[in-house]
């Protein structure tokens, strides 16, 4: 698995507006991808950890319910759709990815 900065570079290839754990007061431009670390999957062998994969929660935020970014994000390796919701007239589509 790669680093968070490698994942960030991949996301920048999808849209120039990518935010890693922005503070609540930060003004984001839409459409965008907001992501945060959400999980750590550890595989064990012989009672010792031998493989770690960091899980991230990606949220695509857009004014359009069918933004083209959604298709690009859903095609990322090991990316799975979690849920979608609308808040403050913005569409949020949440994905989980291990990278």
Image (tube, grey):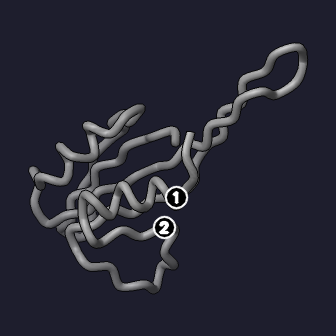
Residue at screen point 22% across, 73% down: 30
* Vertical relation: 20 (above or below) 51: below
The residue labelled by disc 2 is 20
Instruction: Name the spot of residue 85 as percent of width and height, x first.
Output: 27, 51
The residue indicated by pointer 1 is 36
Q: Which image quadrant: the N terminus?
A: top right
Which of disc 1 and disc 2 is earlier in sequence?
Answer: 2
Depth check, front residue: 44 or 87: 44
Quick one: which residue is furthest to the top in this view?
A: 46
Q: Position of residue 55 (x, y in %)?
A: 56, 43
Q: Quadrant of residue 19?
A: bottom left
- Determine whether the residue tagged by mark 1 lies in a helix, strand or loop: strand
Quadrant of residue 50 within the rendered picture: top right
Between the residue at mark 2 and the residue at mark 1, the CA separation in whole angstroms equals 6 Å
Q: x and y percent of residue 54 in the render?
A: 61, 43
Quadrant of res 33: bottom left
Contact between marks 2 and 1 (CB within 8 A): the answer is yes
- Looking at the image, residue 58 lies above or below residue 29: above
Residue at the spot 36% in from the left edge and 55% down from the top edge: 10
Can you give x and y, in whole percent of width and height, for residue 43 in the image? Answer: 72, 24
Q: Residue at x 20, y 48 (%)?
A: 70
């Amino acid at each position: 698995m790669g680093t968070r900065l490698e994942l960030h570079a991949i996301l920048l290839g999808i849209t120039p507006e990518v935010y890693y754990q922005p503070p609540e007061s930060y003004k984001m431009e839409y459409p965008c991808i907001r992501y945060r670390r959400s999980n750590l999957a550890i595989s064990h062998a012989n009672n010792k950890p031998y493989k770690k994969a960091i899980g991230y929660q990606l949220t695509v935020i857009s004014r359009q319910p069918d933004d083209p970014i959604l298709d690009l994000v859903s095609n990322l390796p090991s990316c799975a759709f979690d849920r979608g919701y609308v808040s403050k007239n913005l569409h949020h589509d949440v994905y989980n990815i291990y990278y």
